[in-house]
Image: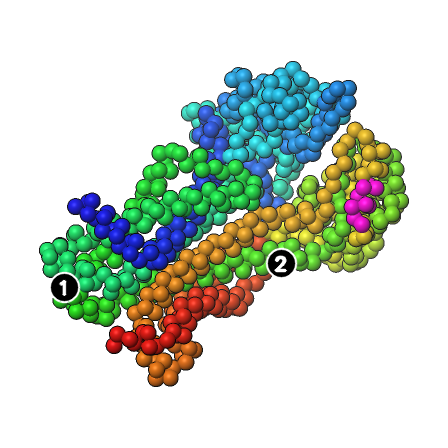
Amino acid sequence: MIRNYFKIAWRNLTKRKVFTAINILGLAIGFGSSIIIYLFLNYHFSFEKFHANADRIYRIDTEETRGTVNHIPSVPPGLANTLRDDYDYAEKVAKIVWKENLVLSITKNTSRVKYKENVAFVEDGFFDIFSFPTISGGKPVLSQPNTAVITEKKALKMFGRRNVTGEVFKLDNDKVIEIVGVLKDLPKSTFLKTGVLVAFENLNSFNSFEAGESWYGISGGLNCFALLKPDVKKETLETALLEFPEKYRANDPTTKHIYKLHALNDIHFMKDYGDVDAKFLILFGIIGLFLIGIAAINFINISTALSSYRSREIGIRKVLGSIKQHLFWQFIVETFLISLMAILLGVLMAAIFLPAFNTLFNIELSLKTLLNVQFFGMILLLLGVVTFLSGSYPGILMSRILPVLALKGSFFQKNTKGISTRKVLVVAQFSISIILIVATIVVSKQIDYAVNSDLGFDKDQVAMLSLPKTIDKVQQQSLKGRLKNISGVKEVSMCLSSPGAATSNWYSTVNYDNRPEAEKFQVSLKPGDEDYLKLYDVSFVAGRNFFKKEYSNEMIVNEQFVEKIGVTSEAILGKKLSVNGVTGNIVGVIKDFHNEKFTRGISAMVFTLNTEWYSEISLKISHRDTKSIMADIDREWIQAFPDYIFEYRFLDDRINQQYRTEQRYLFLSKVFSGLAILIGCLGIYGLILFFANQRIKEVGIRKVLGSSVGHILSLFSVDFLKLILIAGAIATPVAWYLTEQWLQGYAYRTKIQWWYFVIAIVLVMLITLVTISYQTIKVAIANPVKSLRTE
């Protein structure tokens, strides 16, 4: 019996090759997309799973309230030692501090070779908490200063071999560091994104605050991890941490701190703390199911439409004694064969497009990871679900055919229920496509709004260079003068960071007008020289710019600062301001500009002159021959700092980089929208092909009676256009709600326009008309003599 099921199923599938191909291709696209989405989700949900004690490892973060609530994945530097030495909740506590673009140099054949790398400074207990394996099998130890652990990849890059224990390198042209261990290459699914880890004791020469024990201030580059004892619960330690601010931060009552523990397995998905938004991952999973659902709808629609072809077959089989169950399982077997072939083709499609997906997201997904019980279980489940859902309705419908109606060929005309169900499924297809198109438009408009809006400063043709940490005031002024003399360099400014896409955002408390208590808001501190605001073309509302001095007690604030203080721009001039231990007079008020991406509002800002805080150079250069200008800057840099690597980035590129996640999601939205429409069009084409064949004689008679091609086209298209309008009415509120919820994550956002929905509906209409037109026009222009010959 089973053998007969497969034999008849194969015969039926090969008999109608076009419809079989449409079903297989549609399902294959759905399966292929779902496999890539599965790999993507599996990658994100595998973060940190390889650590032996992952269930007991927590990152301690800060919920800071000063006017507004800020979630910071860091703590004051003094918390770690206090928790480790004075409390008995954790087996190990360790800090890690991240530093970008440090110079590592080694000697090769009597010459020095330099590399620019991101470096992590870690406390000794770090490797007791985490299970990062070494090539020797032992546990790394960084208990001594001037020691480091590097990865295999970095060892091969720097020394050309893996086992480099005992080798040395120079860190930022200062300390000689000995390599005491080599880690196996880190997986992508970990928070540790650097291949060079240096003993924490070496941090002091880079940042004494982060290396110290202060409780006043937080650095975003510092993380604190704790391995709790087996009998200690997260809630127990969080309760104990509630007393820390009053006990250790009593001198700052205006800033409220609450220290929270977040499980290692959860921190990757914590949007408030700067990581991946789990809602996007869930959305991807839903989209994968949608694509398979659309393909399954195609199968159901085409199968029920083909019922007229199969009705006489079913009638004869019933007359000869077949029962409903046999007929039902016949259709299930046919669906199984189509689904199986679709899955195999889907795996091939996934293999073809996976490299491009990896490049887009800078990850390393591989089909090899699918060779496990979990994936094969998912495939079998998916195969079973798709087979049952796609095959059960046509199977039930066809098995209920009355033999008398079937043999008369009148079943198809009588079966209005099947037709109405088909319309519901087509509406569902169109609705999903319209929602995806609207989502694509909204995401595109928001990114365009963020990147191309007036940010309040000039970001064009501004190159950013990192200053060596050893540079002094004299070297700063000398370098600035030499760079300004280069033809094509318009302005040069020394600063802590650029406006917008800053590599370092420094927030601090502030005391205004000799008030005894700090204000209930924090300010973004922006140290920069007298040319900073001029270079970025920032407008003044009141007052003036800095006078040209190496150091001054003058300060400039923005409109947001004035608004928070509650006075006018003119009234604030001359008032005293104390920020981060520096006191000065306010001499100017500038217009607000966007210092961070549009997910955050404009903060109060304070600009000061202080050469000790400068870490970057901004260069405004001419549009002409940019490559030649940068080459001249490179030569001056090498003369001034031969031990440092010359690297630069343009500010507009850094700003665009802030939205790389959104741009990736936008690209995927376009891809998924296109796939949804493609699968839907395959189904529409199959239905039109069937309907055209069913009504070929009707079309012939209409042509004889004088109908035009346009009139015949309208006969076939008007019903589909009505269904698209119904789908648009259903999809519009759903799409509006979903996109509005997504936009809530932006402090500055575009508005959802009514014409977004019109474009989506019209686009679906046009694509459907193109799909319908080919087969309809082919039938309409055919010679009616041929179609009526048998009558």
Membership of 79 in magenta stretch: no
Question: Pointer 1: residues within 10 angstroms few (<14), some, or many (20+)?
Answer: some
Membership of 629 in magenta stretch: yes
Q: Is residue 681 placed above or below 166 in the rendered structure?
A: below
Residue 154: percent from left, percent from top:
63, 27
User: Residue 563 got which mark?
Assistant: none
Helix, strand or loop at label 2? It is helix
The quarter of the displayed image where residue 310 is located: bottom left
Helix, strand or loop at label 1? It is helix
Question: Pointer 2: residues within 10 angstroms few (<14), some, or many (20+)?
Answer: some
Left or right: where 606 falls relative to 270: right
**Residue occupying image coordinates x 49% and y 29%:** 57
Amino acid of disc 2: Tyr
Residue in front for this viewpoint, 785 or 28: 785
Q: Is residue 99 placed above or below 4 in the rendered structure?
A: above
User: Residue 449 got which mark?
Assistant: 2
Amino acid of disc 1: Pro
- For the question of whether residue 559 can be seen, the reply is no
Residue 675: percent from left, percent from top:
46, 55
Residue furthest top as drawn: 166
User: Residue 403 got which mark?
Assistant: 1
Residue 780: percent from left, percent from top:
39, 74
Q: State the separation of the CA atoms marked 1 and 2.
A: 64 Å
**Residue occupying image coordinates x 20% and y 68%:** 409
The quarter of the displayed image where residue 692 is located: bottom left
**Residue occupying image coordinates x 62% and y 57%:** 448
Left or right: where 312 falls relative to 520: left
Q: Which residues are magenta?
A: 625-633
